[in-house]
Amino acid sequence: MAIALCQVAALALLAPFASIPLAEINGFVPVVGGVIFVTDLVTAVLLFSQFATHLRRALLILACGYLLSALMIIPYTLTFPGAFSPTGLLGAGLQTAAWFYWFWHLPFALALLGYGLIRDKKSTSGPVQASSLAVIVRSVALVLALASGLTLLATTGHDYLPVLYADSIVRVRPLPTQGVAPITTLVCVSALAALWLRRRSLLDQWLMVVALAAILEIGLGVLLSQRRFDLGFYAGRGFSLLTSTIVLVILLVQTMRLYANLRELNETLEQRVQAETRERLRKEAEIRHLVDANILGICTWSIDGAIVSANEEFLRMLQYSQDDVASGRLRWIDLTPPEWRKQAEDAVAELRSTGAFRPMEKEYFSKDGSRVPVLIGGALFEEDGNDGVAFVLDLTERKRAEEALRKSEYQLRQIIDAVPGLIWSAGPDGEATYVSRRLLEYSGSQLEDNLKPHGWEVFVHPDDLAAFTKDYYQAIQTGTPYRGVLRLRCADAAFRWHDVLIEPLRDQQGRIIQWYGLSINVDEAKKIEGALRESEAKFRAAIDGIAGLVAIMAPSGELESVNRPIIEYFGRSVEELKNWGTGDAVHPEDLPRVLESFRTSFAAGTPFHQEQRLRRFDGEYRWFENRGAPIRDETGRITRWYCLLTDIEDRTQALARLQQMQSDFAHMNRVSLMGELAASLSHEIAQPIGSARNNARAAQNFLERQPQDMGEVREALSCVIGDADRAGAIIDRIREQIKKAPPRKECFDLNAAIEEVIVLAQSVTLRNGVSVQTRLAEGLLPPLGDRVQVQQVLLNLVLNAAEAMSSVEEGARELVISTEHHLAGALVAVRDSGPGIGPAHLDRVFDAFYTTKSRGTGMGLSICRSIIHAHGGKLWAEANDPRGAAFQFTLPDAERELTAAPQASRPA
């Protein structure tokens, strides 16, 4: 496009000056003609070679045009006036050179037009089809003949041609020249248009430049030029040189590219050949390595049955050697068992038709006559040849594995069929792929009925189908296991309850590849469950009707359930009551003791019994008796604990009142005893007072002496103080016994308390002639209790013994008070030598209002037993040996008292 624009620009610049005469250079035309001849001729040769390669008629026409142009430039140059002679050679006339000019340009323009019109058509018939060289030769001959004819016409017949020049310099104007020039120009314009519409290649584009240059040459050199050797003449010849050179340059460039491409192609082909050679050698090496590696058997054979060669693996599997192959004794036909011969013949037929046969399983005879299962495939070396290669794979191990797998599958199927449940499998979409024999027997259906899409739905109870289908396919979509209980139809059309469990099987990537289902018949369990629910309902109604609070706890002690009265009493739910150990359900003062008792019983698995205060819904605490016992299974394992809490608030209040009455009776008893001891006690008190009076007088006498004996005074006054303290102690003991005070528990020295009682009763024992002896054990642990009440019991027993022995006329009157260690703590015994108690009255002496005395109330021993029982001990009577009665009681020590029954610590 740029060159074309430059050409047009040159025409625009030169057109105004085209008629300017310039100097006559006679050698200009021969030089330009010689150059044009050479370039056109070379261009024609190159175009003929292009035609020989591509067989395009357009190229043939264009080559002929360039050849004719080269040939016509010769007579034009020879006949040009002044070039070689004043009038030109070859007998040229005045018009000869001018007509040679048009014989040169007009055919070339026609050749361009022909190329543009038919260049896309390939020669498929006619002379070109026979031989491109013959076509070229005939075309060259035709061009030579045409050139000769035109030369002859222009030289010898120039007189018959129209006059174009008036003389050797000036043209004739206007008609003759303007008639030939417009025709040639029109043909060039037509060629340019045809090339523009059908441009396909680089040659087409440059031929358009050539056509445009020809148009410009005619315009400058003919239409605008007035004569030879003016500016238009010289410029026109320049455009002629351009038209002649452009295509040659393009063809030479394309030829150079072609040779470069051929060189690159040749190098590529060489590289490809080398690569293919290396690849072929590599493959051959791999094949040889495969053969030598003996991974599988390989042999070469002929269709007639001979085995030509074989690798070691092939020989190993059939137990032959290379000598057997070399001897020619090894033939594949003989190695094939009779029942496999037909298959071998079919493989040979397939080889002959396709050159190969598909892999197949068969058997070969080994050398020892045994059979070897193999997988064999083969192919011919050449399509129509008789020799080929076979690849043989020993299937012995695989067949053994398949047999083992079949046995394993059979055993697995036996195991599955032995499972006491219905087993089935389904694909990832949830549709059944397998059902066990038990399932078929249970449902009374055929396998194909179960494997139909949604075929299983007929076995599900209609009431369960919708919910199960929804949950089942939701599990399929989410990939989560399913478990549920539903009714499945049996072969007898009855529906029975089944526990259904469905689990997915996943591959290593986590994708579900199968679903497995297990259905266990739980119909009997459902019936038992229903009966159990009914039983539980009855049990619930029963425990709800119990007049008490019932709680059921797990083996760990966690609260599981309670009866309705507990809910109503506490006004709380079971979940709230589970935290009773940290809440306010139990009175804060009782909670530590209750928790410790619970821990001890649960650890040892023993029943517990305690009393505690529980908070009612209105905030009031009431006393309850809590009894609990473990329930064990047949193995002795604790399965649960049952607790019964009985409201004892009223009983507790009554017991408190009773204890108060007993305390009052005890006080009355002590006062009565002190009344009985009044005379003796007055003597006991008078004695230290008298002694104090005597000691005081002695002190006065010592003071009156001169000199005064202050040591004696001091000693007498010390005796006064001791006598006063002794009298005060006696009065304090009397006050303690007769004053009314609530019982208090404290640790005290039991032996010391006994000594004090002996002192209090000394006047009575002396009056009745009773000898008192003590046998007090050392190291007794101090009991925890009310010291005054215990002394009251001892004093009562001592007075009773002294009074009983007062009636004894013969024998010694002895009273023995002893203490000793006992399993329950301390054992205290009061033994006398009186008349004793008859066996029939031993148990009755402790009854209230029962007495053997004429003036007794019958309350003393009853009160004593109540006091001892309140201290956690026991009081009883028995015959003394050899005579008399023995009253004994036990008192737990402080350590046992703290761990004794909880009611001992309950406030009265």
Image (cartoon, rainbow, N blue to C red):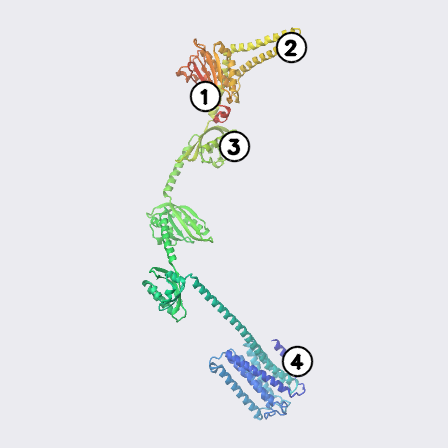
- Residue 13: which numbered mark, if any? 4
| Viewer-nearest residue: 685 or 26 | 685
Alpha carbon of mark 2 to alpha carbon of mark 1: how far?
57 Å
Residue 292 drawn above or below residue 90:
above
Query: Of the residues shown, which amino acid type is indicated by label 1?
Result: Lys
What residue is drawn where x is 49% and y is 68%?
A: 278
- SS at circle 2: helix
Q: Say which residue label 2 marks.
A: 710
**Few, some or many C-alpha atoms within 10 Å of disc 3 (few <14, some 14-19, many ≥20)?**
some
Mark 2 vs mark 3: in front:
2
Q: Is residue 654 left or right of residue 179?
A: left
Alpha carbon of mark 1 to alpha carbon of mark 4: how far?
156 Å
| Residue 115 drawn at (x, y percent) | 53, 80
Query: Of the residues shown, which amino acid type is indicated by label 4?
Result: Leu
Alpha carbon of mark 3 to alpha carbon of mark 1: how far?
36 Å
Q: How many labels does the image show?
A: 4
| Residue 191 drawn at (x, y percent) | 56, 80
Label pair 3/1, CB-CB below 8 angstroms: no
- Residue 874: which numbered mark, if any? 1
Q: Say which residue label 3 marks.
A: 584
Mark 2 vs mark 4: in front:
2
Mark 3 vs mark 1: in front:
1
Q: Specify whether residue 615 is in view.
A: no
| Residue 402 drawn at (x, y percent) | 37, 56
- SS at circle 1: loop
Say which label, 4 or 3, has the lower sequence index.
4
| Viewer-nearest residue: 370 or 542 | 370
